[in-house]
């Protein structure tokens, strides 16, 4: 997870950051499949928010 994603995020980093965040999200979702603590849910939400922010800011379409 990135420490902080702000409005001045450099989209040149998206080609590295986005795949890393997606991989981290996938790993956390697999680990949390048996049940999630509040802390795990918050971490999942933060990563999803970062992914959403980067996709929106850098005009990257969501891959289904």
Image (spheres, rainbow, N blue to C red):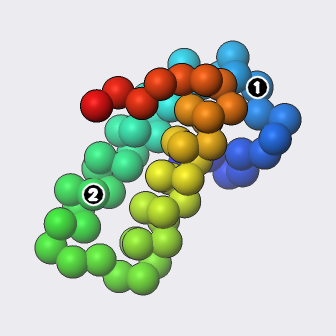
* Crowding at mark 1 (Cα within 10 Å: few <14, some 14-19, many 20+): few
Residue 34 tag number? none
Q: Position of residue 46 (x, y in %)?
A: 54, 59
8 in relation to 46, above or below: above
Give the residue displayed 56% in from the left and 32% down from the top.
55
Is any part of residue 34 visible from this angle?
yes
* Crowding at mark 2 (Cα within 10 Å: few <14, some 14-19, many 20+): some
Residue 35 picture quarter:
bottom left
Name the element at disc 1: loop
Residue farthest to the right, as pictured: 8
Give the residue displayed 48% in from the left and 52% down from the top.
48
Q: Is residue 12 left or right of residue 48?
A: right
64 in relation to 32, above or below: above
Q: Give whichever of discs 1 and 2 has the lower sequence position.
A: 1
Residue 29 tag number? 2
Cα separation between marks 1 and 2: 27 Å
Residue 30 picture quarter:
bottom left
1 in relation to 40, above or below: above
Name the element at disc 2: helix
Is any part of residue 16 visible from this angle?
no
**Quadrant in which the C terminus is drawn:** top left
Q: Which residue is mark 1?
A: 10
Front residue (pair 19, 56)? 56
Residue farthest to the bottom, as pictured: 38
């Amino acid at each position: 997870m990135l420490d902080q994603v702000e409005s001045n995020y450099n989209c040149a980093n998206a080609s590295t950051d986005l795949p890393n965040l997606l991989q981290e999200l996938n790993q956390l979702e697999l680990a949390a499949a048996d049940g999630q603590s509040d802390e795990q849910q918050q971490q999942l939400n933060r990563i999803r928010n970062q992914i959403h922010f980067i996709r929106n800011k850098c005009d990257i379409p969501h891959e289904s």
